[in-house]
């Protein structure tokens, strides 16, 4: 999703740059009709939306996903091996599917370790057998005991 948003943002900037370069020439040659080409593009966009884009009002995200899977199933790899319930209807790159399975397995293993009390939280327990250094006055701390 972030990649698509980044690409669309870059495309928007490129198109704005092109419009900024071309508009002065359109203004000088078309005068008051310099917005006519933009109106034509808008008209084609409206026709495209009305004719080719599906209506999604009243449908759930799951229904939309299922419709997309059905319509694009010949283009994408489907994971339907049934080995993991969460990924039985996954669509996409097989590496992504394998990564999700590995992360789920790791999470399950960590949860089991937590229940048994053997999970390593990433830190060492405080050793209470350490002997604390005696309290030193400020002069000894600064000089390191060299002046006494």
Image: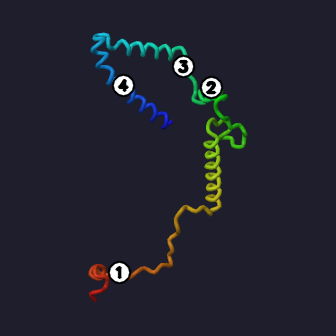
Answer yes or no: do the residues labelled 2 and 4 have beta carbons within 8 Å? no
Q: Quadrant of residue 134?
A: bottom left
Numbered disc in front, either 1 or 3: 3
- Specify which label sits upstream in the sequence, 3 or 2: 3
Point 55% across, 22% down: residue: 56
Q: Nearer the viewer, mark 2 or mark 1?
A: 2
Mark 2 neighbour density, 10 Å: few (under 14) some (14–19) many (20 or more):
few
Determine whether 93 is above or below 62 in the image: below
- Find disc 4 in the rendering and name its residue: 18
Q: Judging from the image, what secondary structure is the residue with disc 3 in?
A: loop
Residue lying at 50% horizontally and 16% vertically, measured from the top left = 48
Q: Residue 53 shows which numbered tag?
A: 3
Give the colouring mode of the picture: rainbow
* Crowd around label 1: few <14 · some 14–19 · many ≥20 (10 Å): few
Residue named by callout 2 = 67
Q: Secondary structure at mark 2?
A: helix
The image shows residue 89 at horizontal and vertical percentages of 66, 35
Considering only order in the chain, which callout, 1 or 4, is on the residue closer to the N terminus? Answer: 4
The residue pinned by badge 1 equals 135
Give the label, 3 or 4, closer to the camera. Answer: 4
Residue 6 placement, left or right of 85: left
């Amino acid at each position: 999703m972030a990649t698509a948003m980044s690409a669309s943002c870059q495309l928007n900037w490129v198109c704005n740059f092109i419009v900024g370069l071309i508009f002065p020439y359109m203004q000088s040659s078309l005068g008051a009709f310099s917005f006519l080409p933009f109106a034509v593009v808008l008209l084609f966009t409206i026709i495209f939306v009305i004719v080719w884009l599906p209506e999604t009002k009243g449908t759930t995200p799951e229904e939309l996903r299922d419709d997309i899977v059905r319509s694009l199933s010949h283009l994408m790899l489907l994971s339907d091996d049934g080995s993991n319930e969460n990924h039985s209807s996954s669509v996409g790159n097989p590496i992504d599917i394998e990564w999700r399975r590995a992360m789920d397995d790791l999470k399950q293993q960590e949860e089991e370790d937590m229940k048994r009390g053997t999970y390593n939280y990433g830190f060492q327990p405080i050793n209470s057998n350490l002997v604390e250094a005696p309290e030193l006055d400020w002069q000894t701390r600064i000089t390191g005991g060299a002046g006494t």
